[in-house]
Amino acid sequence: MQPRQARTLWAGGFVAALLGPVLLSLVNGDDNPLSGQLAVQSGVLATGVMVCAVIAPSRLRSLTRALGIDGVLGVHRSLGLLVSLLVIAHIVLVLAANPSAVTLFDPRQWSLPSRAGITAAVSLIVLVGLALLRQRVGRRYGLWRWTHLGLALVTLLATALHIWWLRHLVNDPVSRLSFGFLAAALVTVLSYRWLWRPFFDRHDAYQVVEVRAETEDVHTLVIGPRRSRHGFCEGAMRFEPGQFAWLRVRRSVMAEEHPFTITSSARNSDSMAFTIRNVGDFTSAIAGLHPGDSIWVDGPHGAFTCDERVRTRVLVLIAAGVGITPMMSMLRTLAHRDDRRPVLLISAAREVTDLLFRDELAELSAQLNLTVAEVLSSPPLKWCGRAGRIDRELLAELLPERSGRRKVEYFVCGPPAMVNSVTVALDELGVDPARVHTEQFDMV
């Protein structure tokens, strides 16, 4: 299935999950006053939004392939904020429809539905608050992640209990059917994400082939399928150039895991490579692995890929630091295909030692129709390349002509600030936003 078709199907599914229960409830009829109906419908809509917010980041490959990881996370965050607003609106509308419901704020008079509803609302508010502070967690990402997941679980369970104990929605056959559909979809996705994939899916088991140093703090991990004597599959993962996968060194749902870009060619079916910068305990553990060690892979994911079918387009690859890793997968795949389309790679870094794959890029420049432009923000005295940052002036100088039949596709990868500034610069230069593909190296 093509990404465009997948986007259409997922959009339709989300719309059905959001509006289906509300429309069914309205069609079924309700003798309550308008204020009471609004109070109920806001709660029903909030439940649908909450289910979609949970499903979005559950690593469904067709969804990440359709929207990309940035798109998936953007949908997840937007839905999280929306459900918070809907819950607040629900509480206000409940009070407006029934002023005596002010007893909700008196713990001594809480009923079972009230306790569950208040628990869900408080958990959701704390959840969203911590999500907004995610950039400040630093090395405490693991604690933040499990706190986020725990609060999400509490919110879901408390919401389910709130609906169950209220009874009037559960007793209605139409509402019961719609809520049953949401519950079934949620349980299916969560079971696949947290039970089947970590414990039973044998296609995610690999072993280390090699770990080699690229620089003092950057290593390349090469992995291959587990041997047949282990009872696992013998074929390596199929992926598109530029996609990524989550890695973990223990087969446990509690094991720490992080996403890394696949840097090897998509045409190499025997192994996969990940180039990783050592920035913490997990990446240091990856660098310390030995050939034969086990490793587990959840992937491939992402839509940050160049389309093999469109061979007439010029490619402009703009990367900062380890943001060059998806570009290397694209270039290596082009080399395997003997693809001679024009490619411009703009590689930015702070210092010369931060420029990765320089020797290989020199070889690829001779093999492909590739031009490499290196940019340093802190260049040495004898640096002959470009200095500064990737801004509008630099892009105006380097970018190919955008007229004629050969369309240009732009791929931008790096830290969020860099990706945002380059995107703005391309827009100012008149580049069609539909031709600009981005991926941020951010916390997920």
Image (cartoon, rainbow, N blue to C red):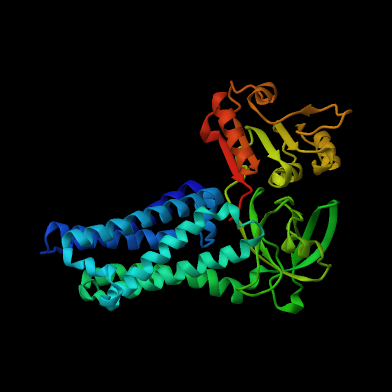
The residue at 21%/76% (across/down) is 171
**x and y percent of residue 412 in the render?**
63, 39
Is residue 201 depicted above or below 262 in this figure? Answer: below
Quarter the C terminus occupies? bottom right
Q: Is residue 146 in sight in this rendering?
A: yes
Relative to 33, is 45 on the left or the right?
right
Query: 115 or 102, which is in the foreground?
Result: 102
Is residue 46 depicted above or below 427 in this figure? Answer: below
Q: Answer with the quarter of the image where residue 395 lies.
A: top right
**x and y percent of residue 132 in the render?**
50, 53
* Residue at the farthest right position: 382
**x and y percent of residue 382 in the render?**
89, 28
Is residue 6 depicted above or below 207 in this figure? Answer: above
Query: 140 or 426, which is in the foreground?
Result: 140
Query: 19 or 227, which is in the foreground?
Result: 19
The residue at 59%/28% (across/down) is 425
The residue at 52%/64% (across/down) is 148
Is residue 66 depicted above or below 343 in this figure? Answer: below
Q: How many numbered circles are shown?
A: 0
